[in-house]
Image (spheres, coloured by chain):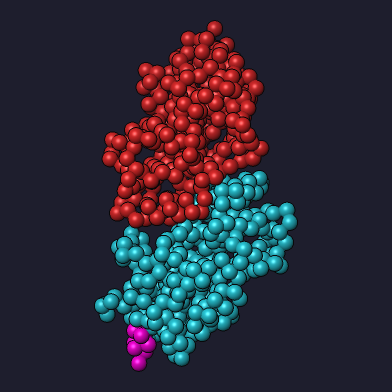
Chain colours: A cyan, B red
């Protein structure tokens, strides 16, 4: 990356938000593998005067299990630093009196233990992966189409992600399928929802211009953060594709090879 | 239906195009059941001076097997009268040099026997039903995302249909999922594509204003036909829902209880 690509916000920066899958690790068999240099990069950020939060659209595990997985990979991370869609959705459901029909991965179900799920009046979908069967999708569809006013919540709106050695459809694709079939617009909880990014900023007590988002997803990480007034940096790991660098609507404030390079350049700018 | 709802085109009418599933029969176990009065209604049309064609987005069976099924239900129908998306797609694929990766129901595969499917440079999806698995959708997605210029053909663009005693997602929903994931716009072959309706009109040698489409799908049957300059009549069978009668963009030229009522009124107007 040339210096001219750099957002040049290093000096005024007070906090960094990291996407997780594709930035810290690549998912796959047995929990995945850490991306080279990312464990040390997180250590360096924690040793700096910058605030650090993790912001993921991961919805296959509840936060406790997810953080345990990251710890096993070698990351210094705790549950309170991680923002994910399910807890945000639970808050919205309770606040607005919604009883969800859930189409989510088994590992995520514990997040919804405290929510009334009888006689559903909305549908919540997450990255259900193999649970996105024809039968389960029809079941969710029938709940929606049977409601006077169908409401669909989607935990994130991602297009696809890297799984092992291939790409897999993410929840956003299935959200679009149900939107079309039911002629509705889903409410996205998680990235790139501004409400979601704002909750992370609030937790750090920072203004948008004081924070930098680093992710591998140009639209949901970088574009979402930019829509909130943050800078957004894309890494060339995870789901990054070279065509991202000539995207029609989203232009990253900078593109770096990986998290290690991003962190080294941020910390260098501050000295 | 009040007479005021009627399109009043009976006298100038020269041809009728009938949708099949939801108009002639309801699908379900063992091939489905004929809708009351529809077998006789087809007989009456055939005995009249009107031309008759059948136009379906059915893509679970090849035309021969599909027509056999209808004959077993008691309908007087032949393959040459039936227009369905697969043969239209085969023509397009050959004309434009496309080698498809197919995500279609097993029963439809024979329609594509004459098409080169090695080293695919496009994806064709039909109503694959139970074959719309997470794995198969990811496979189709990976073919598309691996192409320099991804091209997706969808055999019809329906939202959902009635299957036995419930509604099921139709191919259009999965089309939208892949469109979103790959950031592309699919080419719909079949209803409501104007090219498809026009091929039926050409076969009858009629102008649009001389033909009437009768279907249960407000958007794809009625709206599609209207976009071509035909009149469109909706029946209150199949996937009809009362909310169709206050749809924001499509208004049928008439709404009748079933095909039997539609045919009786058409023939009465002509005497």
In this rendering, the count of numbered labels is: 0
Q: Residue at x 53, y 14 (%)?
A: B45
Q: Which quadrant: the N terminus of chain A?
A: bottom left
> Which range of residues does the magenta coloring cover?
A264-271
Q: Residue at x 62, y 24 (%)?
A: B34
Q: Position of residue B90 (x, y in %)?
A: 36, 35
* Relative vertical location of residue B55 with respect to residue A123 in this rendering, above or below: above
Give the side of residue B25 with respect to residue A248, left or right.
right
**Closer to us: B144 or A261:** B144
Tell me where residue B35 sits by quadrant. top right
Q: Is residue B264 visible?
A: yes
Give the side of residue B112 with respect to residue B257, left or right.
left
Q: Position of residue B30 (x, y in %)?
A: 61, 31
Q: Position of residue A169 (x, y in %)?
A: 47, 57
A162 in magenta: no
Give the side of residue B105 with respect to residue A109, left or right.
left
Q: Position of residue A138 (x, y in %)?
A: 59, 47
Q: Residue at x 56, y 66 (%)?
A: A60
**Closer to us: B33 or B113:** B113
Magenta segment, prevailing SS (helix, strand or loop)? helix
């Amino acid at each position: 990356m040339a210096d001219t690509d750099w957002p040049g916000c290093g000096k005024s920066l007070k906090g960094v938000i990291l996407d997780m899958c594709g930035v810290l690790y690549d998912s796959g068999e047995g929990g995945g593998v850490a991306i080279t240099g990312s464990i040390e990069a997180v250590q360096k950020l924690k040793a700096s005067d910058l605030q650090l939060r993790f912001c993921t659209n991961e919805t296959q595990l509840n936060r406790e299990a997810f953080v345990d997985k990251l710890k096993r990979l070698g990351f210094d991370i705790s549950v309170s630093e991680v923002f994910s869609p399910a807890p945000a959705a639970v808050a919205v459901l309770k606040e607005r009196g919604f009883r969800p029909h859930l189409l989510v991965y088994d590992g995520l179900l514990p997040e919804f233990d405290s929510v009334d799920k009888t006689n559903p009046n909305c549908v919540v979908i997450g990255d259900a992966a193999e649970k996105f069967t024809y039968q389960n999708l029809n079941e969710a569809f029938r709940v929606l189409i049977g409601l006077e006013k169908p409401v669909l919540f989607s935990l994130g709106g991602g297009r696809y992600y890297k799984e092992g050695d291939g790409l897999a459809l993410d929840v956003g694709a299935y959200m679009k399928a149900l939107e079309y079939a039911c002629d509705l617009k889903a409410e996205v909880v998680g990235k790139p929802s501004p409400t979601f990014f704002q909750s992370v900023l609030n937790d750090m007590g920072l203004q948008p211009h004081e924070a930098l988002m680093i992710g591998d997803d140009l639209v949901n990480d970088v574009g979402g953060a930019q829509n909130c007034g943050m800078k957004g940096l894309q890494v060339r790991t995870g789901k990054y594709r070279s065509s991202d660098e000539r995207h029609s609507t989203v232009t990253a404030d900078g593109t770096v090879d990986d998290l290690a390079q991003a962190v080294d350049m941020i910390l260098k700018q501050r000295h």
